[in-house]
Image (cartoon, coloured by chain):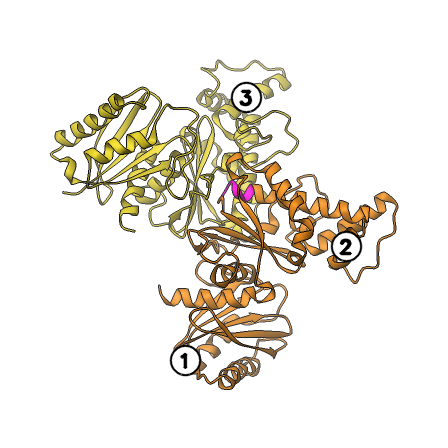
Chain colours: A orange, B yellow
Amino acid sequence: MNKVLGIDIGGTSIKVGMFSVDGVLEAVTKIPTGEIVSEAAFAVVTEGLKGLLAENGAKPADVIAIGLDVPGPVDDEGKVGMLANIELDPEGLQAAIKHTFPNANLAFVNDANAAALGELWQGTAKGANSFVLVAIGTGVGGGVVCNGKLISGAFGAGGEIGHITVNRDETASCGCGRKGCLEQYASATGIVRGYKQACKQLGTTPVNLDGPTDTLSVFNAYRAGDEAAQTAISQMCDCLGYALAQISAVVDPQIYLIGGGVGGGFKLYADELRAAFRKYCLAPCVATRILPASLGNDAAMYGCAYQALLERGE
Amino acid sequence: MNKVLGIDIGGTSIKVGMFSVDGVLEAVTKIPTGEIVSEAAFAVVTEGLKGLLAENGAKPADVIAIGLDVPGPVDDEGKVGMLANIELDPEGLQAAIKHTFPNANLAFVNDANAAALGELWQGTAKGANSFVLVAIGTGVGGGVVCNGKLISGAFGAGGEIGHITVNRDETASCGCGRKGCLEQYASATGIVRGYKQACKQLGTTPVNLDGPTDTLSVFNAYRAGDEAAQTAISQMCDCLGYALAQISAVVDPQIYLIGGGVGGGFKLYADELRAAFRKYCLAPCVATRILPASLGNDAAMYGCAYQALLERGE
């Protein structure tokens, strides 16, 4: 039976899903890795993959496609760019996997792009012709699908919607070196920062926060009527709605999907986000739907598997 | 011999090109029309098309595809939206043409989108996987091509890049009802307005202007060292470069093509525009090329023909 693997590469471990070619997730495993830059580390990965297959009655020769999602840019040709947050030698890992799985097509996919493809394959966006996934976590990533296909970009910057400028007057720098990016206001980090600033301005005491990305506590404070939390979430919705309106003037998707960790709080801010989008968008786009993503943390694992499978058919 | 027609619909006349299926423009004619809302007017169009074919040794049955470009929104399904500037009954015209050319696939395409497709078929973008055409005329239109395909948009707003917000502090309204759109600064109208404002601020006398879109005179003044013209063109380049940088964070194209009437002056402002884009874009995108379009006023006629031909093969 033909199988497809989706490999979600993180800083300290990888998560692997074994799929049928129809997109049914049949088994999942986690493989602790650390840096993936040596033959020994590549072997840990390939042995882990073989183990997952063996446990589930499959052989390496059954695997026809393997996707790997990475937290960094991947261009239209599938080439991986600079990876800031993990230690990975993509070419080395690719060679090792290719050696173990000779029948498999391999594809690297940017993590937010992979999440979009996952939603297209088996999530909220199944069958959609066009949509944009907004992945809100520590940063803000995105995946743009038009005419049923992912737009990776000529330089791997397709869907880098966290770096749409929303405030030209900002003086603080974004991680990208520019100023006033969406990510500075609408990421988990941005929401928590906005909350603290609002507390300062209002002269109120912030609730206890478990680190710089603890939006859960901010959302709970919002539910309890905390004014500063309302201010921070309004700012997040305003910035995100404004950025989505800019995206609509470029690709005009049918749907925006809100995913990532902060996507989990979607119900809390959905109305305010939709209102902000409608305030800023071109008139024909007011009917664009803004919905929650549905695959949670598995989305990228699904999506990179799907991309590897799609490329095989080309 | 199979033929393809491209019909460029204007306010007082239509321009028709007869193409080979390989994209060679074999003959062109202009048909005076006026409003295209009655059976009599539809007959003027179909008779004109038949005349063009007869003069060039072809029959209606030879025509396998007919594209019509219109100055207004056309959605992903090919449905024409509100047309503000021309009197046209698209369904009526479509039925009349279909009756006369039973073998032809018909397609409506937005004019700027059609221009992009024209450049993809036979212009500067031939063979490109991704590019964005910026059509600068009275307004600023655009056509976005990714993965080799046009992005019309779910509501026909794909490529409406003239309505990317570049100045959130603007108090004057754009034609779309919003404020601070690219079109307010980088269109022919915007450049001339910017020139007049700069003259006022500098206390200088504007050169003679032949109406509100006479960028030619502003460009000539620029060449002669007119400081206000330099200011207006710098503002246009800054706004356009900023908007293109936002587009790159969404679709990250290989190439930007500058077309439309103002595109003719490309050499004059190319360096300044490229510098503005590099100032605002994400680091990986600095190598994006910004080039002049090559088909001039024929681009849309080529492109709508191409779209009708492409859809036939699907």
Mark 1 touches mark 2? (CB < 8 Å):
no
Instruction: Note whether A234 is above or below B26 in the view shown.
Output: below
Q: Is residue A53 magenta?
A: no
Chain of the residue on which disc 3 is drawn:
B
Circle 1 Cα neighbour tier, 10 Å, few/some/many (<14 / 14–19 / ≥20): some
Q: CB atoms at circles 1 and 3 under 8 Å apart?
A: no
Residue A181 appears in the figure: no
Mark 2 residue type: Val
Q: Characterize the magenta stretch by its predominant secondary structure.
A: helix
Q: Please give the name of the residue rendered at 44% of the width and 22% of the height, measured from the top-left corner.
A: B216
Instruction: Residue A111: name its quadrant.
Output: bottom right
Between marks 1 and 2, how big is the CA–CA gap?
47 Å
- For residue B9, which quarter of the picture? top left
Amino acid type assigned to the residue bearing label 1 in the image: Asp
In the drawing, what numbered circle is on residue A62? 1
Image mark for residue A27 = none
Q: Are marks 2 and 3 on the same chain?
A: no
Residue lying at 62% horizontally and 59% vertically, measured from the top left:
A260
Mark pair 2, 3: CA separation: 47 Å
Pinpoint residue A69: horizontal percent, then vertical percent: 53, 66
